[in-house]
């Protein structure tokens, strides 16, 4: 075998396929396969057509300016306002009475805001921000619970031309301060608190602590009274002159506010994402290209229709909330369901109760949530009426085939297409995904790039193994390698705030002239793309490259296993050995032979080469607050190293307990 074809030796095979039903296909927004070829022929002209779906106050003079590559500019000279496109134009088109946001709180009440009401709320907040001194070009940090007011605040920033920098409500004061200082934020919008699993999250107090650490650019803190005085908890300190009450300021503002006319390339937002050096990267997105990308992909991938009740379970603290709660769906005048709390409050059926209550038609969630639901058991979804659902989506990490099939069977009742959507904070919008009315799907595969997106698979050395756009030809044998995106697209990041050099080095230097996302990929014999996780999640075991995700899938395929995280661990002879951290389903009895059984099962599913060296049973896996397993920490544990940065962990106790157990087991 040549080194090139050996690059990523993917061993796990998946042969089940699912075709869109004739019924779904006939009503789908996209059902002509020609769209792929049309887009591939002239991607720039194709994206220009998509941009026309938005309302511009001045047309562009140039669609794509690539003269300063990799600093690309889209729709140069065009002018528009993102908030106008998400709110005002729908009201003007007669949709004022249509629900824009249905906000379900964790305690269980809900409130519906029509597009007209949204316009009023957003305008008042916009006027309040102006009263606090926020001007076009300023940055505003938003640190709020997942309520409608968070969405309104983002839109209010866009309305007055200020860039929002949303920080997830679970981040620590240190992380807030780091982001606020890097972005030189003037005003923070926060809330007294929010609800999570029946407990109050003290957001304002976190902001106080962050500012105490030193945030010299902060002038004002606007505090939304989410909880008011109804609960007893530590509200922190009220700093006269700095802190401003929402109920005093926002409620008394005029209910109209003009939209600032923005250049297509004016900054819409900064969103921080973790980088390999530990210092977060402020990913920049601009107005015209970003909105064009998320508007089009929402319509294609989620097949949005006027009557849909669309629920994306993400938080606006992550890119998924930006693109597929606020800007994508709302620029399409969708009705968006927003839920504040956790999936197990008051009980483990909460998601299904929310769907039943609001008759949600589209559900977009993450594999980690799906695996959690699997662990809890089918009795929870089974006791709810999920018949309103017509489409399911997955995002954030590779979805293992067993979770995909469970989602299909128990949530979709074998009736809903599943769109497994691959993309990143940096890409702004979905890049690789099925089109639900057109694409045959395979569990675990995000299938192929969307129309207008061009990709390639490269070897470690940077040789192109195959290119993918328009149509995918079936390769003679599976091709494994590293993903690259080969042409610019409108919603691409425009850089890293304050660090243009890092932008070029991180994304454009690995493969000359191509965008490097950092993900491994496999194209199987049937022409399906499998995203295999970050390239640093690929293990080199006795010269064979094995994706941690493949071993995880094999483990989760065992009936006793709820969840698994696999890492490569230094091995004297093989270079790397395979170490698996596994959680067992609550109703399964662990015996002395469980570990051997699991090792054998992986050996059978993938081959002896993938048989784990160590398996550690654990009650829980360390995860970030957005639900991603922190393999880096597991590697630290397995290698007996000092634990690295733990600030993004959802629950820091999990990893300490795990290390103690690992050491006690003598692994
Ligand atoms: C949207 C989002 C990006 C990274 C990305 C990849 C992983 C996301 C995926 C997926 C396999 C999918 N990822 N979606 N891997 N299949 N459908 O999650 O953005 O938080 O920036 O993460 O997540 O590794 O590179 P972000």
Image (cartoon, rainbow, N blue to C red):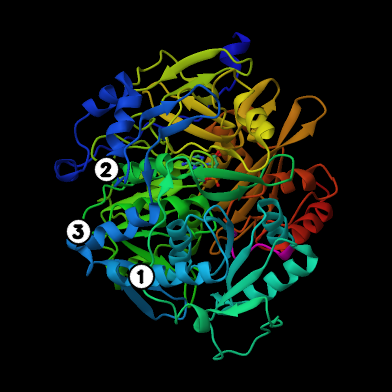
Secondary structure type for disc 2: loop
Few, some or many residues within 10 Å of mark 3 (<14, 14–19, 20+): few
Check contact, mark 1 vs mark 3: CB within 8 A. Answer: no
- Distance, label 1 to label 3, CA atoms, is 18 Å
Of callouts 1 and 3, which one flags the residue occurring earlier in the amino acid sequence? 3
Relative to 7, is 437 above or below?
Answer: below
- x 42%, y 72%: residue: 124
When asked about the image quadrant of residue 506, the answer is top right
**Front residue of this view, candidates 478 and 554:** 478
- x 52%, y 14%: residue: 464
Left or right position of 114 against 8: left
Left or right position of 156 against 548: left
Q: Quadrant of the N terminus?
A: top right
Few, some or many residues within 10 Å of mark 1 (<14, 14–19, 20+): some
Which numbered dot is residue 53? 2
Where's residue 508, x and y in %?
Answer: 60, 25
Secondary structure type for disc 3: helix
Where's residue 616, x and y in %?
Answer: 71, 50
Of callouts 1 and 2, which one flags the residue occurring earlier in the amino acid sequence? 2
- x 56%, y 32%: residue: 517
Q: Which residue is mark 1?
A: 256
**Front residue of this view, candidates 446 and 589:** 446
Q: Which residue is mark 3?
A: 93
In magenta, the rendered stretch is 166-173
Relative to 443, is 246 above or below?
Answer: below
- Residue 466 colored in magenta in the image: no
When asked about the image quadrant of residue 648, the answer is bottom right
């Amino acid at each position: 075998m040549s080194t090139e074809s050996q690059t990523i030796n993917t061993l796990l095979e998946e042969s089940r396929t699912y075709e869109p039903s004739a019924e779904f296909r006939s009503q789908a927004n996209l059902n002509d396969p020609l769209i792929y070829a049309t887009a591939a022929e002239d991607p720039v002209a194709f994206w220009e057509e998509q941009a026309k779906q938005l309302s511009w106050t001045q047309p562009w003079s140039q669609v794509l300016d690539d003269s300063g590559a990799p600093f690309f500019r889209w729709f140069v000279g065009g002018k528009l306002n993102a908030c106008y496109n998400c709110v005002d134009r729908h009201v003007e088109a007669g949709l004022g009475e249509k629900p824009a946001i249905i906000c379900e709180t964790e305690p269980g009440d809900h409130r519906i805001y029509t597009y007209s009401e949204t316009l009023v709320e957003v305008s008042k907040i916009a006027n309040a921000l102006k009263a606090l001194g926020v001007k076009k070009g300023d940055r505003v940090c938003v640190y709020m619970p997942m309520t409608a007011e968070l969405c309104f605040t983002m839109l209010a920033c866009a309305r007055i031309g200020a860039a929002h920098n949303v920080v997830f409500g679970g981040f620590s004061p240190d992380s807030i301060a780091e982001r606020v200082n890097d972005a030189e934020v003037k005003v923070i919008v926060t809330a007294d608190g929010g609800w999570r699993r029946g407990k109050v999250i003290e957001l304002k107090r976190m902001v106080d602590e962050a500012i105490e650490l030193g945030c010299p650019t902060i002038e004002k803190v606007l505090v939304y009274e989410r909880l008011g005085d109804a609960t007893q908890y530590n509200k922190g300190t009220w700093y006269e002159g700095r802190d401003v009450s929402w109920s005093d300021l926002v409620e008394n503002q005029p209910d109209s506010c003009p939209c600032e006319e923005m250049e297509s390339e004016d900054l819409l937002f900064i969103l921080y994402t973790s980088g390999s050096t530990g210092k977060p990267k402020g990913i920049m997105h601009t107005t015209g290209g970003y909105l064009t990308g998320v508007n089009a992909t929402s319509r294609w991938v989620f097949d949005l229709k006027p009557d849909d009740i669309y629920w994306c379970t993400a938080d606006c603290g992550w890119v998924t909330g930006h693109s597929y709660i606020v800007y994508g769906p709302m620029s399409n005048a969708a009705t968006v369901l927003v839920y504040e709390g956790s999936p197990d409050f008051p009980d483990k059926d909460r998601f299904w109760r929310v769907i039943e209550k609001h008759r949600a038609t589209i559900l977009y969630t993450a594999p980690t949530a799906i695996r959690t639901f699997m662990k809890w058991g089918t009795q929870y979804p089974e006791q709810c009426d999920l018949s309103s659902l017509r489409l399911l989506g997955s995002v954030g990490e590779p979805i293992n085939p067993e979770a995909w099939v469970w989602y299909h069977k128990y949530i979709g009742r074998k009736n809903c297409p599943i769109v497994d959507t691959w993309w990143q904070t940096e890409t702004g919008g979905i890049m690789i995904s099925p089109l639900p009315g057109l694409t045959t799907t395979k569990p675990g595969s995000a299938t192929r790039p969307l129309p207008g997106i061009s990709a390639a698979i490269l070897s470690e050395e940077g040789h192109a193994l195959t290119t993918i756009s328009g149509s995918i030809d079936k390769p003679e044998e599976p091709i494994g390698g590293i993903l690259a995106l080969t042409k610019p697209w409108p919603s691409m990041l425009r850089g890293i705030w304050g660090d243009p050099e890092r932008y070029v080095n991180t994304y454009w230097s690995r493969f000359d002239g191509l965008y490097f996302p950092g993900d491994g990929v496999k194209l199987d014999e049937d022409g399906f793309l499998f995203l295999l996780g970050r390239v640093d999640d690929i293990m080199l075991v006795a010269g064979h490259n094995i994706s941690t995700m493949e071993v995880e899938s094999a483990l989760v395929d065992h009936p006793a296993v709820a969840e698994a995280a696999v890492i490569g661990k230094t091995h004297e002879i093989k270079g790397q050995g395979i170490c698996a951290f596994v959680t067992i389903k609550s109703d399964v009895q662990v015996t002395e032979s469980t570990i051997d059984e699991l090792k054998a099962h992986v050996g059978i599913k993938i081959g002896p080469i993938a048989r784990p060296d160590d398996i550690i049973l654990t009650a829980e896996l360390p995860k970030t607050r957005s639900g991603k397993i922190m393999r880096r920490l597991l590697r630290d544990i397995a290698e007996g190293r000092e634990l690295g940065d733990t600030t993004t962990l959802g629950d820091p106790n999990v990893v300490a307990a795990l290390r103690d157990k690992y050491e006690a087991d003598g692994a």
